[in-house]
Image (spheres, rainbow, N blue to C red):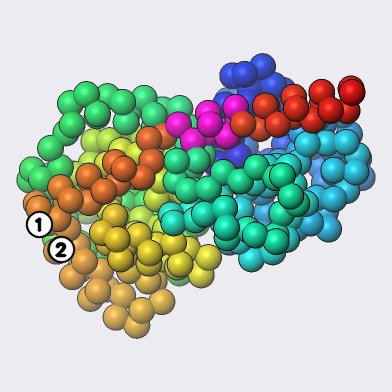
Amino acid sequence: MRCLALADALRNRGARCDFACGPDGAALITRFSNAGYPVRSLTAGWADGADVVVFDSYRIDAVTEVQARAAGCTVAVIDDLADRPHDCDLLVDPGYGRAPGDYAGRVPPGAILLTGPTYALLRPAFAALADADADGRRDRSGPVRRVFISFGLSDPGGVALRAYDALRSRLRALTVDLALAGDADSLPGLRQRAAQDPNLQLHVNATRVEALMAAADLAIGGGGGATWERAALRLPSLAVIVAENQREIITRMAANHCLLALSLDRPDFATALRAAYDQLLDAGLRRALAESAADLCDGRGADRVAQALLARWAQSTRRAGA
């Protein structure tokens, strides 16, 4: 999703963007974008003709990146772990509290480092909704009438169903918008729940959830990229850590009162989830979380990264011409 957001921003600046990925990635590009981006298979020569290559994979490091640089490509990397070396011209890490010093010795001298949530890669709709909210500054301390629940494209351990069931008694009088993928383990059980509860609205394979987020009074979801979507919309949130690579950032954000956090691997997950939800009902806490979130991310990160990346490519091209 973050690569699609960057591709849209680059295309708006006149670049042609192709994707190189496996079949699962190709299916997601088709599902979530109507831009018609070409998809290349990961076979020999997949980067032929590219001026810029953007890598976004935990399985890729300097060993692969150096090959693209050797072919004359400007290389950009999207990372959020700061745990391995990169051979790149530009690196983006939108993690909360991340600083260029975290990549000391891990990138070549002169590499551009874009760190922190101001560079979170979100679709333009989030910036537009953030602007609209800034004009009116929606009161986040009012009564809770609508809840947004989504764990993105993943559903580890059927977490969406587990979360809904744990909170079911508390959500009965509210409208619940629950977004999930069509292949989520939770979907059959949630369809049964929705048949019994007209207030539970399921949004399967939804491609535009920003309006649902904007309408919500609070959110419960995974601790991945959607963290920045919720922050851009000043949505008071409970972030569930569903993967180990999320733990450091989400824990740090919770310690600084940007959101509430809970780990999926807690043996008392359901009880802890109810307790955290009850905390979010406090009007003063929701107001404070909304204001903290507003300072993190304005939704324009993809534009900033696209501008910096194309400027770096132009600089490299001038050097090569000289």
Q: Quadrant of the N terminus?
A: top right
Q: Where is 82 relative to 204, above or below?
A: below
Q: Where is 148 relative to 103, above or below?
A: above
Main SS class of the magenta portion in the image: helix
Q: Is residue 199 left or right of residue 39?
A: left
Q: Quadrant of residue 204?
A: top left
Q: Quadrant of residue 141?
A: top left
Q: Give the SS element for disc 2.
A: helix
Q: Is residue 245 left or right of residue 217?
A: right
Q: Which mark is residue 282?
A: 1
Q: Is residue 36 magenta?
A: no
Foreground pick, 204 / 98: 98
Residue 135 percent location from the top left of the image: 22, 24
Residue at figure coordinates x 57%, y 60% from the top left? 102
Task: Confirm whether residue 184 shows in the render.
Answer: no
Residue 304 percent location from the top left of the image: 53, 31
Residue that mark 2 sits on: 279
Residue at figure coordinates x 70%, y 31% from the top left? 312
Mark 2 and 1 residues: CB-CB less than 8 Å, in contact? yes
Give the residue furthest to the bottom: 267
The magenta region covers: 300-307
Residue 145 percent location from the top left of the image: 13, 44
Q: Is residue 294 left or right of residue 145?
A: right
Q: Amino acid at mark 1?
A: Asp
Q: Is residue 117 left or right of residue 85?
A: left
Q: Is residue 304 magenta?
A: yes
Task: Confirm whether residue 108 shows in the render.
Answer: yes
Q: Quadrant of residue 21?
A: top right
Give the residue furthest to the top: 14
Q: Quadrant of the C terminus?
A: top right
Foreground pick, 81 / 166: 81
